[in-house]
Image: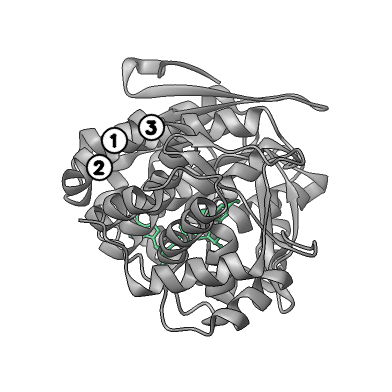
């Protein structure tokens, strides 16, 4: 990962290197007003005859249509393909409809897809790009905080199936990622808070100073200070990119990004996805850190420190009333924990992930320890 000024002097450029084979470099540009630079940026950076902007209905109206107009005005051939909004449309059916539409419109080998939307769009349009004509380039333009700091770095694309989420997909590194924090102005509060949960995660497992910065600026981030949002996006992307660069195919250190997610995924499943992901991650981080403390892996007080920052970010930290034994059973069904014991990535302290004694970064957590941690989290932590 290397940092620099973005072309044109606006914002920050983060160069993300993914070692091969095949090795790929990807520029992530973060800056206020960067969306307006997009026609120029894609024309200069992506060798393509035509551009297909893929956007869900509401985001198409907010940003997709203006982008289409700007591209055409700059003489860049482009079409806007809309799809119905929501996770329930991140499916093979929508993939089929979009690829059929591209074929109908005559898009050929030299096509570039531009994904404009949240994580659903990035995953879906990414899978379209990974498969269309055996793979065409994609430019990711994430418009939610979660998609900016989590979904658009790492090259994972997927659709959901009735058997589970993200089960059919591909790795497809974007040619360029463009993030304009100005678009976060229209994001609902709940979605903003969800993104903050993932940023807190980055601080906990990778960077104590960033964790402190988040604690200090939580209120101003919630009030959408442009300057602070830009720093948050740039720093989180840099941190995630640093992890992904060392582990492109999700085999080793990337596991640390799963902190909070073993519990979160189980909670989401158990509540039939009625619980927002970021909220589940907030609850999951506190519960898993408590388990880490009980195992002697995590410094005592870490869970409370995490809880304090999450509360400042407007996130809940207590698990909803669920049957802990059932929840632990659900964790075993998660595709990421197919071993005998439930496995979690854990911090050693704020800012530092703990390596597992047996190698790797996933710790076996015995059922009774998890049970106790969930119980303590449900009783409420002394966080103030
Ligand atoms: N590929 C990865 O590495 C990765 C990582 C994390 C999450 N994901 C995926 O991301 C998805 C969740 O992403 P999400 O939370 O962004 O959900 P989302 O894409 O459904 O977006 C949430 C809502 O916000 C709306 N929206 C988007 N941008 C907006 C804006 N600027 N203003 C107003 N409204 C806006 C969307 O239309 C949608 O209704 C899940 O499918 C998850 O699996 C993927
Ligand atoms: Zn997550």
Marker count (numbered): 3
In the rendered image of this protein, does residue 31 appear above or below residue 189?
Answer: above
Tell whether 86 sits left or right of 231: right
Q: In whole angstroms, how far apart are the C-alphas of marks 1 and 3?
A: 6 Å
Q: In whole angstroms, how far apart are the C-alphas of marks 2 and 1?
A: 5 Å
Label 1 crowd bin: few (<14), some (14–19), many (20+), radius 10 Å: some
Question: Could you tell me if the residues under marks 2 and 3 are in contact, i.e. CB atoms within 8 Å?
Answer: no
User: What is the x, y in percent for residue 147?
Assistant: 47, 50
User: What is the x, y in percent for residue 15?
Assistant: 54, 22
Question: Could you tell me if the residues under marks 1 and 3 are in contact, i.e. CB atoms within 8 Å?
Answer: yes
Q: Residue at x 27, y 34 (%)?
A: 213
Report which residue position mark 3 lands on: 208
Q: Which disc, if any, is residue 212? A: 1
Question: Could you tell me if the residues under marks 2 and 1 are in contact, i.e. CB atoms within 8 Å?
Answer: yes
In the rendered image of this protein, does residue 186 appear above or below residue 1?
Answer: below
Q: Can residue 36 be seen from the camera position used here? A: no
Q: Secondary structure at mark 2?
A: helix
Label 2 crowd bin: few (<14), some (14–19), many (20+), radius 10 Å: some
Q: Residue at x 35, y 61 (%)?
A: 191
Compare residues 327 and 87 and report the one nearer the observer.
327
Q: Residue at x 40, y 19 (%)?
A: 6
Q: Residue at x 32, y 57 (%)?
A: 193
User: What is the x, y in percent for residue 364?
Assistant: 70, 55
Q: Which disc, if any, is residue 215? A: 2
In the rendered image of this protein, does residue 97 appear above or below residue 359?
Answer: below
Label 3 crowd bin: few (<14), some (14–19), many (20+), radius 10 Å: some
């Amino acid at each position: 990962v290397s940092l620099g000024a973005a072309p044109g002097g606006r914002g920050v450029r983060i160069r993300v290197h993914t070692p091969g084979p095949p090795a790929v470099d990807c520029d992530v540009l973060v800056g206020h007003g960067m969306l307006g630079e997009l026609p120029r940026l894609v024309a200069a950076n992506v060798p393509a005859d035509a551009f297909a902007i893929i956007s869900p209905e509401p985001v198409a109206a907010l940003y997709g249509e203006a982008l289409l107009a700007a591209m055409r005005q700059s003489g860049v051939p482009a079409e806007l393909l809309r799809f119905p909004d929501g996770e329930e449309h991140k499916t093979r059916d929508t993939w089929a409809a979009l690829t059929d539409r591209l074929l109908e419109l005559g898009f050929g080998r030299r096509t570039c897809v531009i994904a404009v939307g949240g994580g659903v769009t990035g995953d879906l349009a990414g899978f379209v790009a990974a498969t269309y004509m055996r793979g065409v380039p994609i430019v990711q333009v994430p418009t939610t905080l979660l998609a900016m700091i989590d979904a658009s770095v790492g090259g994972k694309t997927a659709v959901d199936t009735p058997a589970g989420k993200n089960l059919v997909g591909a790795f497809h590194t974007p040619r360029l990622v463009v993030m304009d924090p100005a678009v976060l102005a229209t994001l609902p509060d709940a979605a903003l808070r969800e993104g903050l949960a993932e940023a807190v995660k980055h601080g906990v497992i990778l960077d104590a100073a960033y964790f402190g910065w988040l604690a200090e600026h939580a209120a101003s981030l919630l009030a959408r200070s442009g300057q602070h949002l830009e720093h948050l996006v740039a720093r989180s992307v840099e941190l995630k990119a640093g992890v992904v660069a060392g582990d492109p195919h999700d085999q080793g250190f990337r596991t640390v990004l799963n902190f909070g997610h073993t519990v979160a995924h189980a909670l989401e499943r158990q509540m039939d996805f009625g619980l927002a992901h970021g909220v589940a991650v907030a609850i999951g981080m506190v519960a898993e850190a408590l388990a880490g403390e009980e195992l002697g892996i995590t410094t005592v007080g870490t869970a409370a420190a995490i809880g304090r920052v999450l509360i400042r970010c407007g996130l809940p930290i207590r698990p909803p009333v669920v049957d802990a034994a059932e929840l632990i059973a659900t964790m075993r069904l998660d595709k990421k924990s197919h071993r005998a014991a439930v496995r979690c990535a854990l911090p050693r302290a704020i800012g530092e992930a703990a390596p597992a004694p047996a190698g790797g970064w996933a710790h076996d957590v015995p059922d009774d320890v998890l049970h106790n941690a969930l119980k303590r989290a449900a009783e409420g932590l002394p966080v103030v």
